[in-house]
Image (cartoon, grey):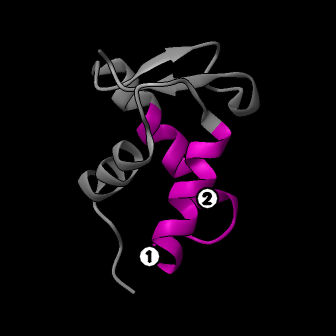
Amino acid sequence: MSPLSDLQIDEAILSVTEASWTKVAFVITKVAGTMGSDLPEGDAAYNLIAKRIEILVRGGRLLAQGDIKKWRHSEVREPN
């Protein structure tokens, strides 16, 4: 098992986001399922993905609505 780079995680996140709003929790679980054993175990994997989502939002590569720290109550999408 080799650790994934931030770029690989970002690419996985961007591959599951669309032009329509998607719950952050869904994006996190989809990416975790796709990347599997390359991620840290347990909650550490989800937290790592969530951190990368926050960075993508700050960088303008994703748009967000709601508090993205509240995964089930926020959404992200691709910018237009």
Amino acid type, label 2: Ala
Q: Residue at x 46, y 69 (%)?
A: 35
Residue 40 or residue 80, whichever sits in front: 80
Question: In what quadrant of the picture does the N terminus appear?
Answer: bottom left
Look at the numbered disc 1 and give the secondary structure of its residue: helix
Q: Secondary structure at mark 2?
A: helix
Camera sees residue 74: yes
Principal secondary structure, stretch drawn in magenta: helix
Answer left or right for 75 relative to 80. right
The answer, for residue 39, to whether it is visible in the render is: no
Over which residues does the magenta segment extend?
25-53
- Of labels 1 and 2, earlier in sequence is 1
Inspect the magenta stretch and tell me whether residue 30 lies in it.
Answer: yes
Instruction: Residue under label 1, please give it.
Output: 38
Residue sitting nearer the eye, 72 or 48: 72
Residue at the spot 69% in from the left edge and 67% down from the top edge: 42
Q: Tell me the quarter of the picture where residue 73 sits.
A: top right
Residue 19 in picture, x, y percent from top left: 40, 26
For label 1, count other residues whose C-alpha is less than 10 Å away and answer few (under 14), some (14-19) or many (20+).
few
Left or right? Give the position of 57 relative to 66: left
Q: Residue furthest right?
A: 72
Can you tell which quarter of the image residue 23 is in?
Answer: top right
Residues under labels 1 and 2: Cα distance? 12 Å
Under mark 1, the amino acid is Asp
| Furthest residue in direction bottom, as rendered | 1
Give the residue displayed 33% in from the left and 67% down from the top: 4
Note whether 37 is above or below 13 in the view shown.
Answer: below
Question: What numbered label is drawn on residue 44?
Answer: 2
Q: Where is residue 9 shown, x and y percent of the image?
A: 36, 54
Give the left or right position of residue 64, taking residue 78 as reference.
right
Nearer the camera: disc 1 or disc 2: 1
Count residues near mark 2 (Cα–Cα under 10 Å), then give few for <14, some for 14-19, many for 20+: few
